[in-house]
Image (tube, rainbow, N blue to C red):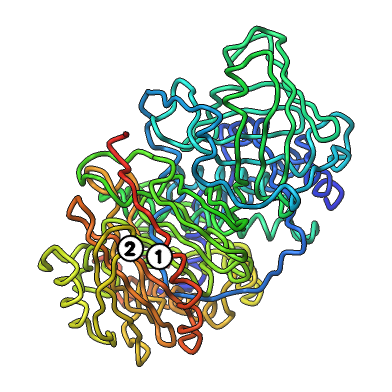
Amino acid sequence: MRAVVERAMHGDREAFGMLVAQTSDRLFAIATRILRDTDLAEDALQSALITAWRELPRLRDPDRFEAWARRLLVHACYAEARRRRQWSSNVRVLPVDGPAGADELVSVADRDALDRAFRRLTVEQRAVFVLHHHIGLPLVEIAETLGIPAGTARSRLHYATRLLREAVEADLEPVSSSSQGRLA
Amino acid sequence: MTTSRDPDRLVRAWLELMPSEAPDRVIDAVRQAVETAPQVRRPIGAAFRRSFQMNRIAIATASALVVLVLVGGAFVLTRSNVSQIGGPSSSPGSSVAVSPSASGAAGAMPAALQGVWLGSGRQIPGTTAGAGTQLHIGPASMALTPSTAGNRNLMAVTASAEGSQFQVQTGSDPTDGCQPGKTGTYTYLLSASGQTLTIGGEDGCPQRAQLFGGTWWLSDCHTQDAAPCLGQLDPGDYGSQYFASVGAQGVAWAPRFGALTFTVPAGWASDADWPSLFSLAPAADYAAAPLHGTPAEDIAVYSNVVAESETTPCSGQANDSVAPGAGAYLAWLRTVPGLSVGSTSTVSIGGHQGLSVDITVPQAPTELCDGTDAVIEYLLSIGWGTSGASTGIQAHAIGAGNHDRLILLEMPSGSLTGIVITTNDSGRFDAFAQQAMPIVASFQFKDAFPAP
């Protein structure tokens, strides 16, 4: 991959196309999870990749291309989220009546509770949460990726995790199967 | 019956519900954009350190500029007035011609020239009257675009270089008003810093010489995504591309080159040029600022400033209970909990009268802005346009240890322009203000829109 990055850094558009092919799915997955909106995620991905092409000659370590691209993407997500916050009073709410999803663990009610809780997080808190829980990045690397102190990353993750846990746990209070009909 | 599910597992499973495959249309759009987008040059010896400054929360986004609708019109410029504004005072002796061998390919445009350059308005159909122009130089092509739509070519030619000259040629499908195959030969001079490009020369198609000729400044903004601020500046006189401080509220914003003009000595950089925010910083602080960060010290100019509602920290909403005018604004400012506001001085900048105060925060606020930052937001720039939305909203905040000087100028339209001289290190404020005030004193504000 390093050789491809170096070719792209020197203006090889074909090489950059290969990098896009290799990384775009992973980057898109991050963007959709931070923004919870596929349209905004597409805009963020497009913006981040075009910026990556333009700024590529400034990349200091070709081996760090994907981490660097992740950073551009997260900042593009910030921009998209704030654009929505400022310019639209009609926040699109994801449908809660879709298929149950991953191993049918997450019920419609869970999704609803988690979606609502997630929307209460700032986009900065969401980014830390997604990079940690979806990508599996350690906090130190998240801090480096986002250009924030490790303590800030830790507090954002702590806040986000606590809020989402509370959202689920509120839904997990002892209930009778007859009243809710939802069992583990 | 009691449920026994693991909340963490639920949350992780919920995270996986979103799609993970990038749509082909996005990839296609990226590939198409990359075909015409030049890469920026690698900065030489640029320092890098992380900065965690929190004294300005920028709410506007880069997208604001690219979606603005351009109106038709033309602005006739001649070679002589192309350089009226923004001609850095670097002498020919301080400039260098760059060998094309730097690009690594014979005949290719020199690497030092490849990139996006900003300049004053050119006479091109489809540009907003008075708006600036972008010059895109690639390895074998040159193109002019409107200052607000870098992906919309108004004129494109093939280009090749030899020594300190380059040649352009009209393609088979002319977009420059010249006959197919028509060539022109230009000389160029690049300042020692590589930030200022001066083009002149002979062209078999004279109107093309008027478009390319003159002074161009490298769009070298490393603190914003795709935002065309200039970055490091040569000493000299400059004009803003997008910022507007004088205009009628309710009238849609339109760019006007030079709506704010200023003079900088050596060692300064421009790190933001938005319709509602223009910013200058010491070059070293600018170089140290990360992507989307703000320099540790800078001069920020906000248009259309209003007091901010304090119903919640950093509400982002205008405080309608504060009367118009600088006096009423400062009276309100003295009531904001947590701020220490110094004595009021009268000022006059660019012919506009105003008031000035110094502001500090003796103790870190206990209520967090946006849930994350211990700062107090005290200034809101509501932007331009019928709703303010089209040009973004900016807000300025201050934290403990910071020191701001706020200058509020009364503009003819009845609006306030806010100039904030700010540093993260209050111990450095006097020294920084001494550097900054001569630049502020050079500010001149011009009617931005409706277009002249």
Disc on the earlier residue, 2 or 1 = 2
Q: Residue at x 31, y 56 (%)?
A: B303
Say what amino acid the circle numbered 1 marks. Answer: Ala
Report the amino acid beneath label 2: Ile
Which percent across, then down, holds residue B40? Answer: 69, 46
* Mark 2 belongs to chain: B
Secondary structure beneath label 1: helix
Chain letter belonging to callout 1: B
Which of the 4 image quarters holds residue B160? Answer: top right
Task: Write the residue at 65% across / 31% down.
Answer: B36
Q: Residue at x 83, y 46 (%)?
A: A4
Residue B200 placement, left or right of B331? right
Q: Which residue, given by chain and number where applicable, does mark 2 sit on?
A: B349
Expressed as whole percent of the image width and height from the top left, the position of residue B295 reads: 53, 70
Q: Are marks 2 and 1 in contact (CB under 8 Å)?
A: yes
Q: Nearer the viewer, residue A129 or A62?
A: A62
Tell me which corner region of the image, top left, top right, bottom left or bottom right, holds residue B357: bottom left
Q: Quadrant of the N terminus of chain B?
A: bottom left
Query: Residue at label 1?
Result: B441
Question: Exactly how many numbered labels are in the figure?
Answer: 2
Residue B354 is situated, as x and y percent measured from the top left of the image, at: 24, 67
Quarter placement of the C terminus of chain B = top left
Label 2 crowd (10 A; few <14 / some 14-19 / many >=20):
some
